[in-house]
Amino acid sequence: MNKRILIIGACGQIGTELTLKLREINGKNAVIASDIREGNKELMNSGPFEFINAMEYDSILKIIDDFNITDVYLMAAMLSATGEKFPAKAWELNMNSLFNVLNLAKEGKIKKLFWPSSIAVFGPTTPKENTPQETIMEPSTVYGISKQAGERWCEYYFNKFGVDVRSIRYPGIISWKTNPGGGTTDYAVEIYHNALLIGKYSSFLKKDTKLPMMYMDDAIEATIKIMDADAKDIKIRSSYNLAAMSFTPEEIANEIKKIVPEFKISYHSDFRQNIADSWPKSIDDSRARQDWGWEHKFDIKKMSESMLNSLHTKYD
Ligand code: AKB
């Protein structure tokens, strides 16, 4: 049977580009985009779209039946910074949406499931440099707690019910097509927009706060690669560490200055500093590289050139 894909949360930062790429590969009618709100023009014009609330089991089931869906990507979630403002809502959305799709897979309604985890599963007691796949995990944010619990449930559904669920721990994702919303790593996207629009940026993280990051093209490639891998090669059914680069606000500002010499940065940290301080600085992703051939392509230089070129064209 041909692959038929449903993306829940298709209008978000990663969902938008994932939908566009999967449509390019599989054909537009094989990929159903869904969200509780409409997305940008490019997304909305690229193929079929359905309104779905990720917390409503019956609405997901209806679309799965109507479109003979085989694979689901659950991209809807409340991220770290917003999660701290609305803890109960974050828990409810992040957990209920996951249980909905895990149960649909358990009941044989879908064949394969992608669910993103995050570096937020780690906490202040985790080793900060080259954080191993298996290590101390004591997340201190609601978002991180929901992702860690989610990982345990994914592994449980695989072991108990044979659910083919695959997951990666995304670092901060940097992209130009759609803005992120409510994350702690969002500064690394805003900084490029502000550099081009007003030539300056006020960072909400301190200048030496190093975090693991990845360019969107690499994130999309990893997501599609883990879903295309042979089931026998997916040896971790909680979630894989994934990495590309790590940098601080000061380092990214210096990279931007090479292209926009008049760019100025200042630092005024807020509540997101505590969140960032609880996360790893760099990640050991050797298991993903070994098991299903993960390789990143973008470093900070290549990413900065691509971001500024693309945004320049967008704003012109
Ligand atoms: C966030 O900052 O909350 C996210 C993440 C690292 O999962 N970008």
Image (cartoon, rainbow, N blue to C red):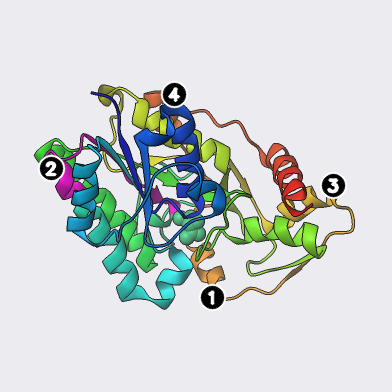
- Distance, label 1 to label 2, CA atoms, is 39 Å
- For disc 3, the neighbor class at 10 Å (few under 14, some 14 to 19, many from 20) is few
Q: Which residue is at a point 30% across and 64% down the rendered structure image?
A: 93
- Distance, label 2 to label 4, CA atoms, is 28 Å
Q: Which mark is residue 106?
A: 2
| Coordinates of residue 108 in the picture (x, y in percent) | 12, 38
- Verify whether residue 99 appears in magenta: no
Q: Which residue is mark 3?
A: 258
Q: For the N terminus, which image quadrant?
A: top left
In the rendered structure, which amino acid carries the disc numbered 4? Answer: Gly
Query: Relative to 311, does residue 202 appear above or below in the rendering?
Result: below
Region rendered in magenta:
101-119
In the rendered structure, which amino acid carries the disc numbered 3? Answer: Lys
Q: Which mark is residue 293?
A: 4
Nearer to us: label 2 or label 4: 2
Decide which of 79, 25 is in the foreground and name it: 25
